[in-house]
Image (cartoon, rainbow, N blue to C red):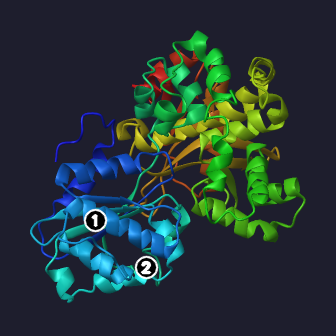
């Protein structure tokens, strides 16, 4: 099916949904689509149903009886049967949904499925029974039933372990935020430095431009500060309170204050489990559950140290939440009064540079290395990209590595394809290159990785001096990556 003209990007998602919805094999099929709110899942699935003549039902928070009445009324309006539908239970409703695909493949979407399951915990088992392999209603149907939801922990559990629907799905899709490159195009930003700044605040969530900012985009680099004040830090815009609502919308986060405190600890560079525990003045073992829940809902990411086993740091995955904790939360009382942004934002520039832009730029460099870098530049295809700390036993010092690309182990020795340094505000010079060379020698002596072809990657948001450019021109193992290369 042709993708709708007003749908930006999402080619992969639309292609997968189209193949699933038009699959002509006999028998009803199940698909599961998940993703955090504001990513465009509803837009995708509603467009799919419109293109293929399918049925879309958006669930709401309601009792089981009310939900049954709502889907009965929606099906009545969709089919226009001789008499309206009045379902006594969900088994009846699911069978009618299967009948929609009696003649041809038809997409049937139940959006916000967790609301229905909250009202009736047996619903996944009811769907499992309806899709039993030899059941006549299933074999005679080509309904392509899609369950969609924003509660990631719940949706992730639908097909896991001993869950009733495990093994029943023919499609499992996670709709992610836009990558930083298409996000810049979506916002209509051609200046890569401005694109990084905007992405460091709003990330790749499509709704933040269209609905939350009402299309307000920084006109140029000089307009960025004004845009932050009138859009992000303005209590009269929806974007202002969005970071708090992101937590409130997750059903598994039953103690918002605790989860906000964990995120605040990570945002304040207390990224290890022990660091988080010290920040909250609690025992590390007591924080295992909230950290796991934040990982499951996609707000925290455990970033393992490439060079030190059993050590990892946690990173906030949603830029807007990191920005909230670094800039908005400390001055919340000020910002709640309209017109105060012009006082708060100038006073927050140092924190924005060090606690928001710097870490965000490092993550963009890791993303570029993993997803965009030419394998010829790295000397191979990276299996993973992370960060790490390399210890020098002779001097008893440690060296942080912002980017470390690990190759695919196919010869008995794991190749370290590249190590890199990412500096947002610093001009890269010969000293940065020499430091990476010394770190590479330390890694070689440690013997864990094959460093015979390890490249040195230098990322900078401020540029490179002549010494660095001359060295890169003279040695094939040195790559200089500036903002234009990140976004080209």
Residue 312 visible in the snapshot: yes
Q: Would you place residue 145 above or below residue 208 in this image?
A: below
Q: Secondary structure at mark 2?
A: helix
Packing grade of label 1 (10 A; few <14, some 14-19, many >=20) is many
Q: Is residue 445 visible?
A: no
Q: Where is residue 407? Give x, y as percent.
A: 45, 52
Mark 1 or mark 2: which is in front?
A: 1
Kindly identify which numbered label has been placed on residue 320. Answer: none
Residue, far front: 83
Residue 157 against residue 55 in the figure, above or below: below
Above or below 327: residue 316: below
- Please tell me whether residue 77 is drawn above or below residue 204 in the rendered image: below
Determine the residue positioned at 70% across, 31% down.
235
Residue at point 42%, 74% (across, down): 159
Q: Position of residue 268 (x, y in %)?
A: 79, 43
> Quick one: 72 or 262, which is closer to the camera?
72
Left or right? Give the position of 219 relative to 314: left
Task: Identify the residue shown where x is 59% and y is 47%.
Answer: 317
Say few, some or many: other residues with alpha carbon within 10 Å of mark 2 (under 14 / 14 to 19 / 20 or more). Answer: many
Q: Secondary structure at mark 1?
A: helix
Q: Residue at x 71, y 26 (%)?
A: 353
Q: Between 88 and 51, which is closer to the camera in this rendering?
A: 88
Residue closest to the eye, 203 or 429: 203
Residue under label 1, please give it: 75
Report the quarter where the C terminus lies.
top left
The image position of residue 430, as x and y in percent, is 63, 21
* Disc number for residue 123: 2
């Amino acid at each position: 099916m042709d993708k709708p003209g007003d749908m930006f990007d999402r080619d992969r998602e639309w292609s997968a949904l189209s193949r699933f919805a038009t699959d002509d094999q006999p028998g009803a099929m199940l698909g599961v689509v998940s993703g955090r709110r504001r990513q465009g899942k509803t837009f995708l699935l509603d467009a799919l149903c419109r293109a293929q003549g399918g049925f879309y039902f958006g669930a709401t928070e309601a009792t089981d009886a009310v939900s049954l009445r709502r889907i009965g009324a929606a099906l009545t309006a969709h089919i226009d049967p001789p008499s309206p539908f009045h379902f006594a239970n969900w088994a009846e409703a699911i069978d009618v949904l299967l009948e929609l695909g009696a003649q041809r493949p038809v997409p049937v979407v139940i959006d916000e499925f967790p609301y229905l399951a909250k009202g009736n915990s047996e619903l996944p088992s009811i769907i499992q029974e309806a899709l039993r392999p030899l059941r006549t209603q299933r074999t005679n149907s080509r309904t392509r039933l899609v369950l969609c939801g924003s509660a990631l922990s719940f949706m992730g559990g639908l097909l896991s372990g001993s869950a009733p629907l495990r093994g029943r799905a023919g499609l499992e899709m996670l709709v992610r935020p836009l990558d930083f490159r298409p996000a810049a195009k979506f916002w209509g930003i051609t200046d890569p430095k401005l694109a990084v700044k905007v992405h460091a605040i709003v990330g790749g969530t499509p709704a933040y431009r269209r609905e939350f900012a009402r299309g307000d985009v920084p006109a140029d680099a000089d307009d960025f500060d004004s845009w932050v004040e009138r859009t992000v830090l303005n209590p009269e815009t929806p974007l202002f309170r969005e970071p708090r609502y992101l937590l409130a919308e997750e059903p598994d986060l039953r103690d918002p204050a605790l989860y906000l405190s964990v995120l605040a600890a990570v945002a304040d560079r207390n990224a290890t489990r022990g660091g988080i525990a010290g920040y909250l003045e609690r025992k590390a073992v007591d924080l295992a559950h909230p950290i796991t829940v934040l990982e499951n809902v996609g707000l925290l990411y455990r970033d393992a140290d490439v060079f030190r086993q059993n050590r990892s740091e946690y990173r906030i995955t949603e830029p807007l939440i990191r920005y909230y904790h670094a800039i908005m939360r400390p001055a919340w009382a000020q910002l709640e009064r309209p017109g105060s942004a012009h006082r708060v934002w100038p006073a927050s520039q140092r924190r924005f540079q060090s606690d928001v832009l710097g870490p965000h730029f490092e993550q963009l460099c890791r993303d570029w290395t993993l997803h965009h870098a030419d394998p010829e530049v790295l000397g191979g295809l990276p299996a993973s990209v992370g960060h790490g700390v390399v210890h020098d036993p002779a001097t008893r010092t440690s060296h942080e590595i912002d980017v470390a690309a690990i190759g695919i182990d196919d010869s008995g020795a794991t190749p370290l394809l590249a190590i890199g340094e990412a500096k947002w505000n610093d001009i890269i010079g010969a000293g940065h290159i020499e430091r990476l060379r010394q770190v590479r020698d330390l890694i070689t002596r440690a013997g864990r990785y094959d460093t015979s072809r390890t490249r040195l990657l230098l990322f900078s948001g401020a540029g490179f001096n002549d010494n660095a450019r001359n060295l890169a021109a003279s040695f094939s193992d040195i790559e200089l990556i500036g903002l234009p290369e990140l976004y080209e």
